[in-house]
Amino acid sequence: MKTFYTAREGLVTLTDDVLSIVSQVRELYGDKIKICLEPTQGKFIFSEVCGDGTERLIFIADKLDARCIERLLTADSQLRGYEDAYDKAEREQDEAMAARDELQLERIKDAGERLAWAMEEDGRGTHAQILVTKNVNAYK
């Protein structure tokens, strides 16, 4: 147990359970997560100190126990390797569309080559030159 005095609250005693939770949070997050006791309601406030110095609320708990650690870990999407379901579905859809496009290109590859050869033979091929001046403002 740890006991200390504050001018506002007087003598404050923290039990071993509370100190254990605080030390576990410190082990996991260092100084990034703060746990404060709100004096008027007696609730524990978990907040994050962001890189820009802003302090943001994570959650408020009536009691400081092991459930708070579990809730904090569940809330921390980066620690548990969270994968955004929407982003995953988008990637899968992009892969499926790329595979379908590749299949379509394989199907028309021969016909496209024959068409390009025929157009080249006819004088309307893809190797025609188009001259463009470097001075864009010349045509104004």
Image: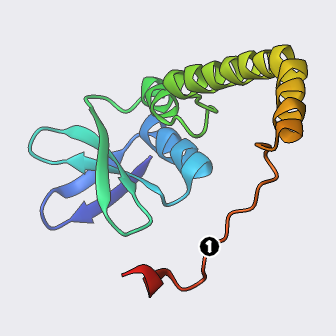
Residue type beneath disc 1: Val
Q: Horizontally, is 12 left or right of 112 in the view?
A: left
Q: Horizontally, is 8 left or right of 112 in the view?
A: left
Residue under the image location 44 percent in, 65 percent down: 51
Q: Nearer the viewer, residue 125 or 4?
A: 125
Residue 38 percent location from the top left of the image: 19, 47
Which residue is situated farthest in the front direction here? 122
Residue wearing tag 1: 132
Residue under the image location 36 percent in, 55 percent down: 3
Residue 46 percent location from the top left of the image: 34, 44
Crowding at mark 1 (Cα within 10 Å: few <14, some 14-19, many 20+)? few
User: What colour scheme governs how the chains and residues are painted in the rendered image of this protein?
Assistant: rainbow
Report the number of discs: 1
Q: Nearer the viewer, residue 64 or 79?
A: 79
Residue under the image location 64 percent in, 25 percent down: 94
Which residue is situated farthest in the left direction here? 40
The quarter holding residue 125 reads top right
Residue 34 percent location from the top left of the image: 39, 53
Residue 98 percent location from the top left of the image: 72, 24
Q: Nearer the viewer, residue 8 or 106?
A: 106
> Disc 1 on helix, strand or loop?
loop
43 versus 28 height, above or below:
above
Q: Horizontally, is 88 left or right of 40 in the view?
A: right
Residue under the image location 55 percent in, 51 percent down: 29
**Which quarter shows the C terminus?**
bottom left
The quarter holding residue 101 reads top right
